[in-house]
Image (cartoon, rainbow, N blue to C red):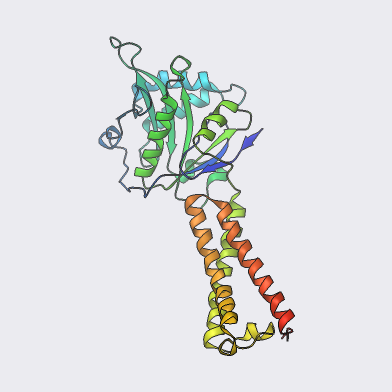
Amino acid sequence: RVGEMECSRASGALSALGPPRPVRRRTRGRPRVTSASGSSSSRSALTSRSVASDAVVRPMRQGDLSPVVATLVEAADPDKVSAAALAAYALEASQAPAAREIALVASLAPTPLDQPEVVGVVGVLLADDLFPSEMRIKGSDAAYVTNLAVASRARRRGIANDLLHSAERFASESGRSTVWCRVDDDNDVARGFYKRRGYAPREPPRLVKYRDVLSSAYGFAGLAHFIDLVFLNSTVAVYAGAPAFWEMTGLEKTAALVWCAAGPLATAANFWAKKKNAPSVAVAGLVAYGAFETALACVCALLFGARGG
């Protein structure tokens, strides 16, 4: 891949043609879980009048195949994705059960006297095996939005916003709390579009997992310290040079209890940050715990002289 960008956002979604890179979005509110099947009734229920444009967004039908392929090919970079690959995708999406994937199209009549014609498309993948390999993260509870395209004759009318909104709604109603997709670094138009919707770079999964492990360890450590401090022999405090908990002054007890609480608070901050896609909050919680523990140990060493153990 050349020039790809990972992004994420607390409420939004991302899509691009060809092999761009993952972007994640948290859907607003609690997702409503509905059974998603391939029946015509479940697909028809998705038809809706658009929010930002005059288009109608509905599930793709096989009769839409030709204009959908034409729209995708027009919007795609031929050096990155072939017309044959886009045609194969469109055919598969039109036939797939909605529990696995769906393609939504926007239809718009050129004039009030004309029949509506397909002018835009977006795909939503739900089955994990359809995701690009780097997006298959166990327990991610995610949908993957792909191939958002609008015909050149219908652009700058809000159709892309409406397609994306409908894709996000479908993901939420299918029980997904997160939406991912990918965009090329050199696609300035697409990046600007998604940035206006609140998107930001998405973190590598290994970094997220590392914070999960670290915050969990801090949380368990805080609980263990509290039990030892209050109910057992205050071993850690004594090794740091401080007196046992029940021999401490009021100020010393307060500092010790804050130290115990800092670990679980770091765990809670990490959990909240994952829900809100706010990694800076998770980092702040971990750093605060480490800094407070280090500072407290230094104060104990200065005031009491650490005994070690």
212 over 69 or under it: above or below: below
Between 211 and 135, the residue placed more toward the observer is 211
Lateral position of residue 185 relative to residue 197, left or right: right
Lateral position of residue 109 relative to residue 298, left or right: left
* Res. 199 visible in picture: yes
* Res. 221 visible in picture: no
Instruction: Determine which quarter of the picture holds residue 202.
Output: top right
Total marks placed: 0
Q: Which residue is drawn at 47% across and 25% down?
A: 149
At which x and y percent is residue 106? 37, 24
Between 144 and 217, the residue placed more toward the observer is 217
Q: Which quadrant of the figure contains the N terminus?
A: top right
- Residue, far left: 41
At which x and y percent is residue 46? 31, 34
Instruction: Determine which quarter of the picture holds residue 36.
Output: top left
Q: Residue at x 52, y 47 (%)?
A: 136
Between 139 and 255, the residue placed more toward the observer is 255
